[in-house]
Amino acid sequence: MNVDELVRDSLREQAAEPLSVGPGFADRVLTVRRRRHTRRLAALAAATTAVVAIAVSVPMLDSGKDDVRLASEKNQSDIIAHPDQSPPRALIAAGDTALAAYYTWSIDKQTKDRAVHVRDYWLLNQKTGRYEKTTKWSFIDVAPGMRTAAVLEKDLPAKRIGLLDLLTGKVERWIPVDRGVAGVEFSPDGSKLVATTYGKNPDLLYKGDYDSDGDGKNNDWMPQWGESSRTGFYVIDVDSGESSWSAVSYEAQDLNVRQDFGFSHDGKLVYSGLTTEPHMQYYDFKGNEVDKPANEKYTHWISDAGVSPNGKLVAADGGAVLDAYTGKVVTKVAGGQTPLAWADDKRLVIWGCDPKKCDGKNEFRNQLLLVTIGSDKVVPLSDFRKASAVTPGRWTPMFSER
């Protein structure tokens, strides 16, 4: 496993302008709920007439004063798949989730013995419905509804957070911060941000003195393991820009160099991943340690999918689906490798391999699949990634509620 894969695993992850909010931000977040209802009505109608459609436009059933038609809204099909594309070029979606963006890794050498691990992002253009490359930002997270993204500029830690309009491609406003931020994540309802603060760039790499990728050369770029400079987190109200910062200390050896905070399933707490037991530690918004929520006792920070929308199930690596409260294995999904996002309470988007087409011997040759709990049905959403951990351009997906 090379440094890209090591850092990718460790991540699994994951102002000068006025503070007034751009008009209608909260309303745009709330329209997510209306769109979910619309899609479910459309799916029910399709089922009633025994029609199965992929990537077929369904008209919106409601509209509002600020209801701008985004590309992700224009096509309300239950499944939008492009099994011939890897990396994707056009919108991919299933149920209530969509591929909001993806990124690849590259190494920017700064000196002979220091470099920066850089993410190159492809964001969904909400005008065209296609993914477009941007090199302006070092870190991105997309809000529910996929109209807005939180962005950080290239030099980390950053002293401001941008709110990028994915329809216009322009930053609506900047939220200034007193302490340097290197990671951001929206709450499940899009009303808040958790921003992780660091003393120095957590994506720095240093020339190693051993051969980590097996190429016979002791010149690989590696993070400084066990030396995290993480200092704490901000919880930021997106509408007002008001924030509070909490210092959170932990033994550096229990953290990856980059170990960002995320929100709990209900958005009422934040958590940090740990490299040692108990692997996840939860905090209230004032930075006080608290117990794990009852339905998150069996989650792990490396699993992006986590708890199902109804809070009853947990998706684990390897294809197992657990009872969220007891940890009992409910079922295993076909072709499952890594759970990425819940499409709804019964379906998962995963990295996997259709059992009818793959022998399962190569973990790196995988594609986006939609699988259904309690069924062997597998729907390919993308084409395969290249079958190597060191393939240039190997892409990592980012999902958001549409």
Image (spheres, rainbow, N blue to C red):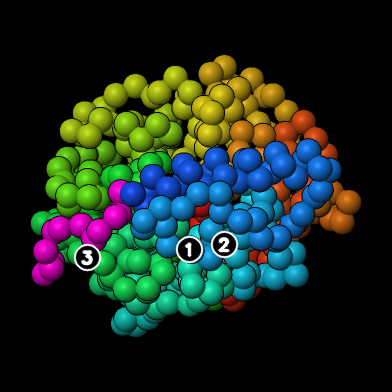
Q: CA distance from mark 3 to mark 2?
A: 26 Å
Q: Is residue 83 left or right of residue 229?
A: right
Prevailing secondary structure of the magenta residues: loop
Expressed as whole percent of the image width and height from the top left, the position of residue 319 reads 69, 39
Expressed as whole percent of the image width and height from the top left, the position of residue 220 reads 47, 72
Location of mark 1 (residue) = 69
How many circles with numbers are drawn on the protein? 3
Residues under numbered marks 1 and 2 in contact, where contact means CB atoms less than 8 Å apart: yes
Q: Is residue 15 magenta?
A: yes
Expressed as whole percent of the image width and height from the top left, the position of residue 241 reads 17, 52
Image quadrant containing the N terminus = bottom right
Residue beneath the point at 56% across and 24% down: 312
Determine the secondary structure under disc 1: loop
Q: Is residue 320 above or below residue 261?
A: above
Q: Earlier in the sequence, mark 3 or mark 2?
A: 2
Task: Name the image quarter holding residue 40.
Answer: top right
Task: Name the image quarter holding residue 30.
Answer: top left
In the image, the segment drawn in magenta is 13-26
Residue beneath the point at 46% across and 42% down: 33
Q: Earlier in the sequence, mark 1 or mark 3?
A: 1
Determine the secondary structure under disc 3: strand
**Residue 294 can be seen in this image:** yes
Expressed as whole percent of the image width and height from the top left, the position of residue 215 reads 60, 73
Residue nearest the observer in this picture, 131 or 199 = 131
Farthest residue toward the top?
326
Location of mark 2 (residue) = 74
Residue beneath the point at 32% across and 36% down: 270
Q: Which one is in front in this view, the residue at disc 1 or the one at disc 3?
A: 1
Location of mark 3 (residue) = 173
Q: Which mark is residue 30?
A: none
